[in-house]
Image (spheres, coloured by chain):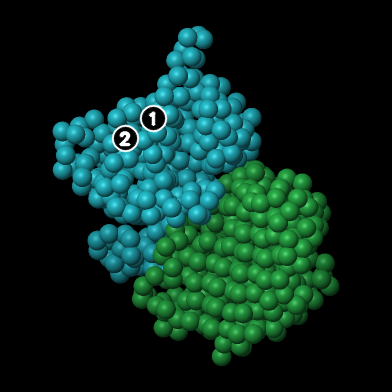
Chain colours: A green, B cyan
Amino acid sequence: MIKVALIGAGKMGISHLSILGAHPDVSVVGVCDTSKMVTDVLTKYSGFNCFSDYLQMVDKVKPDAVFIAVPTKVHAKFIKDMLDRGIHVFSEKPFCLTPEQGEPLVKLAKEKNLINQVGYHNKFIGTFNEVKKLLASGKLGEIHHFVAESYGPVVIRKKQETWRSDPEEGGGCLMDYATHVVDLLNYLLSPVKTVLASKLQPIFSNRVDDAVYAMLELNSGLNGILSVNWSDETHRKMTTSITIYGTNGKIISDANELKVYFNDDKCPEGYSKGWTVKYVTDLTDQVDFYLRGEEYSAQIDYFINAIKGKVKNDINTFESAWITDRSLKLIRDKAS
Amino acid sequence: MERILFGDNQFFAVNHISDEKSRAQSIRFKDDAAIMRTLDYAMEAGVNTFMCTTHERIANICDIVRANPEKYKDFKIFPCMPYAHKYANAVTELGIMGTLKQYVPGNFFGSLFKGGVAFLSKDFLSIMELLVDSEMKMFKGVNTPVIFLQNVITDLLLGLGMKDILKGFNDYVKKKYNAEPGFITMNMPKLLDMLESVGIENPIICASINKAGFRMSGGKEVYEECLATRNFRPVAMQVLGGGAIPPKEALEYVCSFPKIESILFGASSYGNIQDTVTKIRQFDAQRLVGK
């Protein structure tokens, strides 16, 4: 049994907690949150050992690993405190507020040989992994452009503010929403080298961006467009998609559906000239416990298996999330 | 429960495999009249139960049903609550407390705040009951013999081990609405264990049951074993496995389990509704003859 504690029982924290609670290899040894209401409910109805001070918690319950799901502003401090104590860390995204904050943590986790993972769950989605395989096959010819998009209905009118509407705390569409797409670009294609143009646009919010539009150049030399808007109520929930143009074909993929066009017959097995459509249902492995999507359980399984030494700790490492933080900074700097 | 239940995903742009199809559906069912027309097709095919989320547009459907008592005298709705995206988006924007403030009706929440938050947890079941009432408001005067808890909430509570809240929902639905409680889940075997552990016997459980094993967490074999040996009233959903299985094969599979009490499906066109209903009735008849 891996002893796991949770710091931060908000939306993502509670979701992780439920999956951890159902995990056969995990024992939840502690939960920490500053809301008395939340810890009272979790104590009374779930029987979890709850705390309001995270250091007191870890020093008392001595977990093997922690899940950190608190506002981004305090990620760096909390993560360092855990690594210093030799505890494996799964942190919510984005990794840190700035790449400067994250860099020493990447080194520290490596030095201490601790498992480190960040919650970019798109990498556990079957369609996006199939895109990665297709790109590796080289059959798409020379890749010459991409369009990376994400839309959803998070802020669809002027409303009350929380930490997500505070730029100092890591709020806004760039840090909360676009970060998923930028991370996916880093993973599928290559990290962002330069931001050619960028616009952070408020729509309903007063202090943060509700949309991010940018033209990016990647390390590989590839150019493309980023378009992200969390004030789009035509989408029922967050919808992330990527279109990749090659000289021998084109890929359009979202989390559900993969559409691939090949100009000729020189394509990988399972594909043919013209359009081939595949669905996530054919590309995703079954999980033991399902909540909101297979990818949320799969990323936790991966983290637990990495601690047990069953898989390499090489998906969504601190280092890869730090590269994404660096890309976010480039987009922010260019817009200001 | 009727053998065949008509679902609502197609009306609200819920398509598990294609965002493009979602958008097409959202355009097609923009007007309530389009939804009513499709419900009428289902009734024509002999399907009188509509199983639907507590989406705000269902309120309009209920208005139409109430306004035409003769036409809809046999019509039943199985509400599935809550419409989770409403709350999920609110939590991202407002936080957990902000969301409760917004959705818990009346002054109850305000007075609790005055009395101090520590008091709140003791009355968590009362908050749950108030939320159920707020979701049920739109169905006043409509026949709702079964009331379901949506899978996101059922499974969240399941993972958190909050069996008393599942039990609280179960008891409240019976007491206040004189209805049968139902639970939608993606983790049927685990849920059944938990419900039985708090004394809920022979529960109505709606779960993915399909030949492809899609969203049958823990594996198809465990599900099939439950269907053969356990005491519960299963409603099969996602019988097409998200579109992975040809309809005939898919329906033949679910109809082969005598334990499955009802089959939930959704469709947009007259032809597809007729086809699906006819096939289910055929396979059911074959199974009975086979006996």
Considering the numbered disc 2 on the image, is that residue within a helix, a strand or a loop? helix
Residue A201, position in %: x, y? 48, 81
Image height of A302 relative to A220, above or below: above
- The single residue placed furthest to the front in the displayed view is A264
Q: Residues within 10 Å of mark 1 (few under 14, many from 20)?
A: some
Q: Measuring from the top left, give residue A102's x and y in whole percent.
A: 70, 78
> In the picture shown, does residue B44 fall above or below A86?
above
Residue at image coords 42%, 78% = A203
What's the residue at 62%, 58% (across, down)? A253
| Left or right: residue A9 compared with residue A154 | right
For image coordinates 53% across by 72% down, the residue present is: A228
Q: Residue at x 59, y 58 (%)?
A: A254
Contact, CB < 8 Å: mark 2 with mark 1? yes
Nearest the eye: A2 or A221: A221
Same chain for the residues under marks 2 and 1 in the image: yes
Badge 2: residue crowd in 10 Å (few <14, some 14–19, many ≥20): some
For the question of whether residue B51 can be seen, the reply is yes
Residue tagged by mark 1?
A: B274
Q: Which mark is residue A38?
A: none
The image quarter containing residue A336 is bottom right
The amino acid type found where label 2 is placed reads Tyr
Furthest toward the bottom, the residue is A336
